[in-house]
Image (cartoon, rainbow, N blue to C red):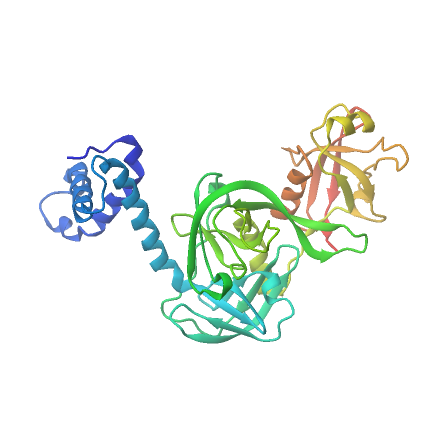
Amino acid sequence: MTRITKNMKYVALFLLATVLAGCGSLGATTRTADQVDIAALVQKEIDARLNQRADIIPAGNRAQSVLDIGLEDTLTGLYQRISPSVVYIVVGQGSGSGFVYSAAGHIVTNNHVVDGGNSYEIVFANGERRRARLVGRDPDSDLAVLKVDSLPDTAAPLPLADPASIQAGQFAIAIGNPFGEQGSMSLGIVSGLGRSLPSQRGRATGSTYSLPEVIQTDAPINPGNSGGPLLNLSGEVIGVNAAIASSSGVGSGVGFSIPVAAVRRVVPGLIENGKYDYSYMGASFDGEVSLGEQSTYGLTQTQGAYVVGIAPNSPAARAGLVAANSNTGRGGDLIIAIDGQAVNDFGDLNSYLVLQSSPGQTIELTVLRNGQRYIAPLTLAVRP
């Protein structure tokens, strides 16, 4: 008999849930829940699963087979539960993916999927089709919301994960419609966190805003996956698949998903107002200070966001922030904290502004200026 070891803990818990789900009659017996021999139930279920697959299980590798069976059962169950809520979006000559966000018929996808469209057709996993209307879109987060008048009975809103629960190395599952192949599923891991994607809204200066805390994954993502969900093993949305790093236009093992933290903030605004307002400081930065730049700028440390420009009549100007001298590059403020949270580079500052602040809010910046520490209150405006 195979023993339950520590490296089988996850699968044992999964199989335990399966066993208990089928034990509704236990409560009607004379034994109470805490008297049930849990280990025996789990072991019985493990042995039953192994015996069912004895023809394909390598001899002497039963422990690894338990792990494989548990993961396989998790993935097949997740697909059966989630795929009815993942949709195929037809936009004129193009297409993409999306997922059901609310019981009212709201569907989340990418801004670049709906961009330029004047009609939207939603194809559900069971073959039902609906016309949809555009509710709102946001080029800065690459998110958009469509709405259908009704949903199939099988299409339920997908749950959103807690942003704090996402970790590099955890499994990541993408479901979408790559190359028009509806309902395709791929598996990988979260291969990186804290990435950024440039906004699709160009500025007159040639620079762009960027979305922080983007998730990097090696789960295969290809054209047509855009707008579909990236999920954890619990079937919770951790991101919205949006882009790939590729020289050929197909998946290279480096894909990017809009983080669920942005979905939680932006999508309600799109539903309510058709747009989302971001916080605005009105300053530009050298986001990462190298050792060479530290010497050039005359700074005492590299950690922080270095102010290199300030827009006239902006919140930053009104707060008295100082930009670097355009000729020497020296004299600018180095922001090292925002509302008491450390700022190691511009990414930290941008993440706080985008995901933790709102226009009209007064934030407290800690800055180093000419070697001295100052506190600068700044009231945020709406990003133009």
Farthest right residue?
327
Locate residue 235, reporting x and y percent: 40, 52
- Residue sitting at x 45%, y 64%: 181
Count of all numbered marks drawn on residues in the image: 0
Above-or-below relation of 347 to 381: above
Q: Nearer the viewer, residue 158 or 8?
A: 8
The answer to whether residue 156 shows anywhere in this view is no
- Residue sitting at x 20%, y 48%: 53
Locate residue 259, reporting x and y percent: 55, 49
The answer to whether residue 282 shows anywhere in this view is yes
Q: Is residue 52 left or right of residue 365?
A: left
* Quadrant where the image shows the C terminus: bottom right
Q: Is residue 101 left or right of residue 201?
A: left
Above-or-below relation of 107 to 355: below
Which picture quadrant has residue 344? Answer: top right
Above-or-below relation of 92 to 228: below
Farthest left residue?
30
- Residue sitting at x 29%, y 31%: 6
- Residue sitting at x 66%, y 45%: 353
Above-or-below relation of 256 to 329: below
Locate residue 248, reporting x and y percent: 60, 54
Which picture quadrant has residue 270? Answer: bottom right
Q: Is residue 271 left or right of residue 380?
A: left
Q: Nearer the viewer, residue 273 or 178?
A: 178
* Quadrant where the image shows the N terminus: top left
Locate residue 277, reporting x and y percent: 67, 56
